Image: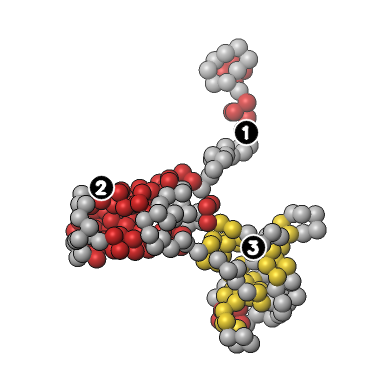
Amino acid sequence: MSTFDTYDNLIEQKLANTSEVFFTPEVKLQAANDTIAEILKEYDIPEFTRRPSTTGQLTFASGKADFPADYFRMTKLWKTGTSGIESNIYTYIVPDDFDQLSSTAAYYWTEDYDPDDDTRKLMIKPTTETAVDCRYVKNPTTMTVSTDESGLSSKWDECVAYGSSMRVLQQAKLFDEARELERLYLEKKAETYLAVKNPGGVKQGSKLKSRWDRYSLLGQTGGYYDKCR
């Protein structure tokens, strides 16, 4: 996992400026934290993906559950059948639409204010379900000193550096310079995510073979060309 020290050195390279007066450590630290939070809003990063507790399930009562303590955003809610196979995936809908559903409607979830205890909660329908499998992205780590780790793997270092440098220049009102770094940041962000989202590699898709796939077209004896002569 990378520390702010790592990002700071890379940011100075991108800015071509090592001044701690004009570009203060506090400004760069906030820019790095903001960049990491933006990445986690957009992508399901493996290092930040969690299951609740040891069971991997959230406990609901009357269709309501507290958020996990480190909850940032949901990636998936589902039910696992008795055979251990995924049976139902919950679909997110906005609170206004959720309100219109009957208590037996299946399978939906939302996040909304609960007037019973004055907090926001996860809510599901049907309300009779009590244990639901969950996968979510945890809160980004807020770095406060140079030795704090971000939680991201080093694969993201260049991306975080470009995004942080862009923000530093925007704050300094150097918008023309910031635009070029923004372009590089967006490119690096997409490139890095493509590299990490398939840790097992891209799988070759299955394909039905046509009759033409079963014969050689190169003219060997026994090939399709030979059959047509």
Residue farthest top in this picture? 221
Residue 139 is situated, as x and y percent measured from the top left of the image, at 50, 64
Q: Note whether residue 218 is visible.
A: yes
Which image quadrant is residue 182 in?
bottom left
Q: Note whether residue 186 is visible.
A: no
Amino acid type of the residue that numbered disc 2 sits on in the rendered structure:
Gln
Residue pointed to by mark 1? 209
Which of the two discs, 3 and 1, labels the residue nearer the N terminus? Answer: 3
Mark identifier at residue 13? 2
Which image quadrant is residue 210 in?
top right
Amino acid type of the residue that numbered disc 1 sits on in the rendered structure:
Lys
Residue 156 is situated, as x and y percent measured from the top left of the image, at 41, 49
Q: Is residue 200 above or below residue 106?
A: above
Q: Is residue 223 above or below residue 86?
A: above
Q: Nearer the viewer, residue 181 or 23?
A: 23
Which SS class for mark 2? Answer: helix
Circle 3/circle 1 CB separation < 8 Å = no
| Residue name at image x 75 percent, y 75 percent | 128
| Residue name at image x 63 percent, y 26 percent | 214
Q: Residues within 10 Å of mark 1 (few under 14, many from 20)?
A: few
Residue 39 is situated, as x and y percent measured from the top left of the image, at 43, 58
Amino acid type of the residue that numbered disc 3 sits on in the rendered structure:
Pro
| Residue name at image x 60 percent, y 68 percent | 68
Which SS class for mark 3? Answer: loop
Residue pointed to by mark 3? 52
Which of the two discs, 2 and 3, labels the residue nearer the N terminus? Answer: 2
Nearest to viewer (mark 3 / mark 1): 3
Separation of disc 3 and disc 1 at Cα? 44 Å
In which quadrant will I find the C terminus?
A: top right
Q: Nearer the viewer, residue 196 or 227?
A: 196
